[in-house]
Image: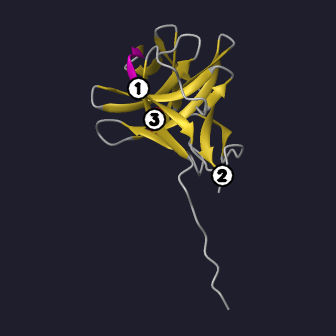
Amino acid sequence: MITPYYVRQAHLSWLPSTAGSTQPSNAIQAAAGICVVRGQMDGNLIPGKMPLRIGAGFIPHNGVEYGLHAFEVLCNTNIFQNQSLYNWISESHGRVPAGAFLAGATNDDLPLYVARASINNEMCVGKVNSEYKCALIPWGEVEHKIENYEVLCLIE
């Protein structure tokens, strides 16, 4: 009898990018035209958003929405491009569901996960961790505290 084996692959990858450059066609979108990105700020690696109409990354940090020239775009690098092996799970008050996609960390090693929420009828992407008791989402040059949000999770 042959022993079955299972192959796992990394189906989400971070690809380097810069503001104004052509963005990958396989970028993960939180909503139409809003891609998931992450960037460095003060020793922190922070998830955020890239509105395709603007072509730059934005992250929340210390109460402010920061624009980034250099950032990484989260992309679907699955061999089978039509498969989505992730989904968005509703959460609130800083809770992070099982299977949440680790996207960054603070400079003191606090893990940061990708959160999305609507602000002024625009889907935005930011960060969440259980210590925050909320998601922190960049919009309008401010870091907004959002109690109800969705978290990017991997599907097993």
Label 1: how many Cα within 10 Å (few below 14, some 14–19, many 20+): many
Q: Quadrant of residue 117?
A: top right
Give the residue type at disc 3. Answer: Leu
Dominant SS in magenta:
strand
Label 3: how many Cα within 10 Å (few below 14, some 14–19, many 20+): some
Q: Nearer the viewer, residue 84 or 89?
A: 84
Q: Residue at x 52, y 7 (%)?
A: 140
Q: Is residue 69 magenta?
A: yes
| Residue 79 can be seen in this image | yes
- Up-down relation of residue 100 to residue 28 (above or below): below
Label 2: how many Cα within 10 Å (few below 14, some 14–19, many 20+): few
Q: Which mark is residue 15?
A: 3
* Mark 2, residue position: 155
Which of the image's four quarters has the N terminus? bottom right
* Mark 1, residue position: 71
Q: Which mark is residue 21?
A: none
Mark 2 or mark 1, which has the lower sequence index?
1
Q: Nearer the viewer, residue 3 or 141?
A: 3
